[in-house]
Image (cartoon, rainbow, N blue to C red):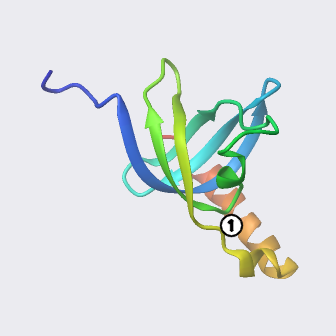
Amino acid sequence: MPGRAPRVTKTEAIVIRQRRLGEADRIVSLLTPLRGKVDVVAKGVLRSKSRMAGHLEALTHVEVVLAHGRSMDVVTQAQAVESFAALRGDLDRLSAALYLAELADRFTVEHA
């Protein structure tokens, strides 16, 4: 129908925060080019056999497919575009990057 939002969205994003939701799920904060900051649910990522777990780590540039949910979008696919391995190997740079990610999370408003 015209005017309806698509049920599935594919976008690139930077993971800026993640927090636990129940035993196996996480709420992941993404910074996207078109929607700004978006909190999404990543179901089952805390399970040992999860294929998405490594792709949704903080400070990772990812391409995600999001399905429209009732209160939050749900990650159905995630693929790391860049994990910034050099950044993770330098404690000073990693600390600075995590601080900037925290600032981005606190000072941006979630897109509805």
Residue occupying image coordinates x 75% and y 65%? 98
Lateral position of residue 38 relative to residue 10, left or right: right
Outermost residue toward the top in this view: 70
For numbered disc 1, what is the local secondary structure?
helix
94 in relation to 46, above or below: below
Looking at the image, residue 68 lies above or below residue 52: above
**Residue 75 or residue 94, whichever sits in front:** 75
Residue 40 drawn at (x, y percent): 57, 36
Which quadrant is home to the N terminus?
A: top left
Q: Is residue 109 visible?
A: no
Q: Choose between 72 and 84: the one closer to the eye.
A: 84
Q: Amino acid at mark 1?
A: Leu
Quadrant where the C terminus sits is: top left
Mark 1 lies on residue: 100
Measured as percent of width and height from the top left, residue 54 is found at 71, 53
Above-or-below relation of 85 to 101: below
Query: Residue 38, position in %: x, y?
Result: 52, 42
Q: Answer with the quarter of the image where residue 99 lies.
A: bottom right
Residue 61 occupies quadrant: bottom right
Q: Give the residue drawn at x 51%, y 56%.
A: 13
Q: Would you say residue 15 is visible in this rendering?
A: yes
Q: Residue at image x 73%, y 82%?
A: 86
